[in-house]
Each structure stands twice: as structure tokens, then as C-alpha cells.
Image (cartoon, coloured by chain):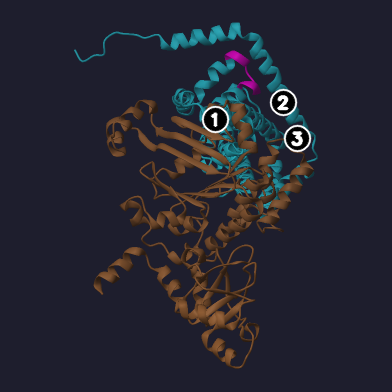
Chain colours: A brown, B cyan
Amino acid sequence: METKVKLEHVSKIFGPKPKSVIPMIKRGMSKDEILKQTNHTVGVYDASLEIKKGEVFVIMGLSGSGKSTLIRCFNLLNKPTDGSIFIDGNDIVSFNSSQLKKVRQEKIAMVFQHFGLFSHRTILANVEYGLEIRDVSKEERRKIALENIEIVGLKGYEDKYPDELSGGMQQRVGLARALANDPDILLMDEPFSALDPLIRREMQLELLDIQERLQKTIVFITHDVNEAFKLGDRVAVMKDGRVVQVGTPEEIIEAPANDYISDFIKDIDRSKVFQAEHIMIKPNALVSMKDGLKVAVKEMEENGISSVFAVDRSRHLKGIITIDDAIKGIKEKQSLEDVLQRDVTVVKKDEFINDLIPKALESMFPLAVVNEEDKLIGIILRVHVLSGLVSDDVNESKEYHG
Amino acid sequence: MGKFPDIRTQLGNYVDQLVSFLDSTLEGFFDFIYFVSSRTINGIDDFLVWLPWWLFILIIIALGWYFKSIIAGVLYGGFIFLIGTFGLWEDMMTTIAIIVTAVIICLIIGIPFGIWMAFSKGFSQVMRPILDAMQTMPSFVYLIPAIFFFGLGNVSAIFATLIYALPPVIRLTELAIRGVDKEVIESAQSFGSSRWQMLRKIQLPQALPTIMAGVNQTTMMALAMVVIASMVGASGLGEQVLVAINRIDIALGFEAGISIVFLAIIIDRITNGIADKFQKHRGIN
């Protein structure tokens, strides 16, 4: 996929002479030492990231790790002390103010933690703001604003003021306002942190939904690991102003770069990160519809299993045959088709373990995992669902004890 | 031994020379200001006196009703009627004209200064002691250069009033602009607002409730100057108070005095009500 935003060695230092501090960090002085000796605050140091078009890129870190400072570099609310930021190949750090204004007006929009709504304007006027300053005509901007208010589910609230809305609704306004500009890149600075857990979950799902439809490039900041792993296609972990690891959620869980990160992800709910395709096994045995029952029995005996999936020539799942049915069928001279059981539970490869648990419990047979074209790509036994929930080190210690 | 040494600085003389210098070199400028302000005062005064008395009372009732409550409106209307029965109707109108003119000029000068102070730390630091001095200097002192520049009359009164009443609107404008929520500013920036758009569409509207509080204070201070300003020949209720002092006329003194109190109450409540209306929907984000 094509790169949308590229950060090269971006640093942001706050203080009277920020540039003078860079060599000190290079020599290995810590953030605290620098603050003590020079009274400069190191916000971000040497961050290099590549964000691809259409991905949700999450930057995660505890408070004070520099994540909010970093996201403000993307639209130059913070001008980096050092380094370059390329958007579509152009270094925006070198832009003059009118070029920068254009980038902000057309390419990047931002959603804020405390919403940053204009309390003196109605919801409609808030959403219209970005268009208004670009001199879009009145009718046109009204039309676009109303569309986006509808997308975020606030139809009918156009003439209300922000203080008449709940927190969740206010953040929807923030989102609609950002979307109205039709930006390529959406910056979201802890947008859901100020919301209560129920609303937060709802907003997360809605964001994913909107993302699926609009395919923006999203940079999302959070301190919540579960949120990061739920939303992020890729996640960057920050500590003390540095980016310490970048990877997909699975990569980070499987191979945390250091103790800090393993500590961070200790409490992660694995069932909401890992998907069917991560825990499934490749089906060793399969029978084709044109095979006879004897072939099916032989397959099962050779692999030591008690049931086998049947597929057609293009690997579409047809059903499952149990060993008992097959032997009985051979005696009664039935065909494979006759003994085929069709009530197999089929799951998509990107379903989370969390959602698989009830299905695995209800189903008498292994779960069949299919890809986008409905082709069978794997099977999941109950035991896989459960073992997928526990992390590797827990596994190890269990073995050690027993 | 303990006596203060015989040193005499000539600070007062320098100021005197400065004022004379200004008076002679900027004569045209002062004439222009005189012309504009006296026209404004007379225009407002003539208009108010021309208004039928019952219509004026109705307007006051309507304003009180809209910004406060119907009871308040009727009460304010009653106050105005009472002032009329003291035989002070026209004096009241002159006083209102002076105050309105002074406040308008205060806003025209004060709001840009406040904005400038909000944007420039250096300018703010320079202005702060000056504003302090303007507020603490006994207001009688302003009357002297006022006479120099504008002679006796209402314009001098306006000038003295201006110096005294200007600081609150400047200070509160600065405070209000500085106080706009940081995220609101950032979000306006993130959409690519120009500085002018930011000021006009975001900062000023967000600051308006606090600026209105400044307007309220400025108006009250202008009213407080009414009697003092009458010493340089301002007409109106203040003049009546001054006359009463000279004649030791308790009746006139009380009537003119209580009229000023009534005006103060009405103006304070109505400008407060306007500020409250602005405050609505502009709560903390």
C-alpha cells in the first residue's frame, strides 16, 4: 500500500532554545536530566513512522509519553524542532504559512480529547466551520454539513448548541466537523477518553464502521491498550518521547520489544485482539463431494479424527461427516451426500475469539473458518479457542508445574 | 539633620509643558475630537429629549422585561417616571447621552487595545502600570488637562470620564481573549483559519461574555464620574448635584442623587442581562 504520511527523525523540544538540546539527547542524556540542567522539555525525540493510505494507525502511550505532542506535529500545531514530515511526498515542515493553511484546510482534520467545539455556534455552524473559512458557498456547506451530521447520527440536532448535548454526542459533532472537510487524514487525539465506557465502546464501533465506508487514513492516540488493539491496523508504542515499537497488535503481543511493553500489554484482553485466523489450524483432512464414504473413513482413520469436512471443487464448505455416520452409511449403502450433516458453524477469518466462544460452546463440531470468498481455510477446535485466550508465558508456567 | 534635603524635581512642570505642547501642536486633532464628540452627545441628547416620554418609559420596560423579567421592567419604568416627576427629565437625558457617548468611545478604543495586549506580552507589560495609574489617579486630576484641550463643557467631561472608565474594558478584553480554551483555539487552527478568521469567528465571540462584563463595569464607572465631570461644566444630573451642594439645597441634592442611583441600577441590570444572554451556550467546554 502507498505511504500517506512519513515522519523522519521528528523531534519536538519545548523551551527557549530547543535546537541546543538535540545534541545532548544524542549523547544519551535522559529527559529528566535535560529538564533539570537546561529547563527544556523533551516532547518527542527521533520519531520515524510510515503511515499507509487507508490504515488506522494508533499511537499508544501513558500520559507524558509524548503522544499528544507527536500528533500535533502532523498538522504543525507543534512545529517540529528537527526532522521532516512528508504528506503525499511533500515535506510540510518546510511549507510557508499559506501552503500550510491549504494543507490544514484540505488534507488534515483533527478531533480533540475535550472536543474543542465552538460553544457559541450551533451544531450546524460548528460542522460548517471548516468549509466556511474556505469560502465554500452557503448552500453548499450547509448541504455537506447536514450530510455529515447524519453520518454521525445527529440528525435533528443541527440547531442545538454544544452545551445542550451529552459528551458522546459532542464528540460526534467533533467527528462530523472533521469529516465535513473531507480530509485524507484524520487525526484523533484521545477522542474517546473523556467518554464513559459504554459510550466509548459504541463510538469505537461506529468509527470502524465509518472508516470502512470512507477509507480515511486515521492517526489515533490513546492510552488504553484495549482501544489501541481494537482499532489499530498498526500500533506504535511510545515511552518518554520515543517510539519504542511499531507493529500490528498481534506482532506486539507475540513479541513485545521490551519489558515496558510486555508490562503495558499484560492486562490486554486477548480474546478481543486475536481473530479466528490466528488460532485456527490448517485442515489436514478434507473430503471432496465426489469422494465416496470409504475415502472419508480412510481420511479420518489416517488422521485420527472423528469427523471430516466435505468441500466442493472450489473448496466451498458443504458439510461435515462423522465417523459413526460414515460407517453406518457404508453398511446401508448410502452415498456421502446422504450422511452429510449441514449444520456446521461457519465463522469468518477475522472474527474475534471473544465472539467465537459462544459459538464453539454451542456447536457439536469444530468451527469452520472461511475467507472472503467463502472458501474453507481452517478449522477451530474448542480447545483452540480456550488456549488462544491465555498468553504464552502462562502456557509455559503451566507446563513447568505440571 | 533629619530634614529632607532641598531637592526639587520638576515632574509636574514637565507634565504641564507636555500638555501645553500637545495643546498647541495637536490643536486640529483636538478640535476634530471636540467636534465629533459634541455632535454625538448633542445628537443622542436631542433624540432622547425628542422621544415622547411614555415611549421612552415603554422602551425601558421592554428592555427590562427582555433581559430580566416583567417585574424588573415595570420597576425600571417606574424609576424613570419618578425621575421625570422630580423635574429632572431633560437632565437625565443629558446624563444618559454623556454616558452612552463615553462608553461607545471606550469600546472603540478599549477593545482593540485589549486584543493587542492579549496578543503581545510586551505591550501588555507596558500597558499594565499605565492602566493601574489611570484607575488610581484621583479622577479630579484629569479635569485639568481636559479643560486645556476642550474647554469647559460636556466634551471635557467625556475626556475625563474616558480616562477613568477605560481600564476595565481593556483589562477584561485582554483577559477574555487570553482565556479562550486552548483546544478551541487549536481546533480552529487545525482547520486552517487565518489569524483574522480566528479572531473574528472564534476568539471575539468566545470572549464576548467577559467583554460584556467589562462594558458593564465601564458603564458604571462612567456613571460614577457624572458628578465629578460636572465640575468642568458637564450638564445633566451631575450639574444638579453640584448646584445643590453650592446652595446647600437638600431637596434638590437628594432628588438628583437618587436619580443617579436609579439610572445606575437600571443600566447595571440591563447590561448584566445582556451579558447573561451572551453567556448562554458559551459555558466551559
Vertical placement of residue A176 versus A390, above or below: above
Relative horizontal placement of residue A327, taking residue B34 as reference (left or right)? left
What secondary structure do most residues of the magenta stretch adopt? helix
State whether residue B284 appears in this view.
no
Q: Chain of mark 2?
A: B
Q: Which residue is mark 1?
A: A91
Q: Chain of mark 1?
A: A
Q: Which residues are magenta?
A: B148-156
Amino acid found under the numbered disc labelled 2 = Thr
Image mark for residue B48: 3
Name the N-terminal-most of marks 2 and 3: 2
Amino acid found under the numbered disc labelled 3 = Leu
Q: Circle 1 — which element?
A: strand
Residue A176, horizontal then vertical, whole percent: 64, 50
State whether residue A194 appears in this view.
yes
Residue found 53% across the figure and 62% down from its top: A201
In the image, residue B222 lies in the stretch drawn in magenta = no
Residue A335, horizontal then vertical, whole percent: 64, 85
Residue A209, horizontal then vertical, whole percent: 62, 58
**B209, A240: nearer the viewer:** A240
Q: CA distance from mark 1 to mark 3?
A: 63 Å
Instruction: State yes or no: discs 2 and 1 in contact (Cβ < 8 Å).
Output: no
Q: Which residue is mark 2?
A: B40
In the image, residue B152 lies in the stretch drawn in magenta = yes
Q: Chain of mark 3?
A: B
Q: Quadrant of residue A129?
A: top right
Q: Nearer the viewer, mark 2 or mark 3?
A: 2
Q: Circle 2 — which element?
A: helix
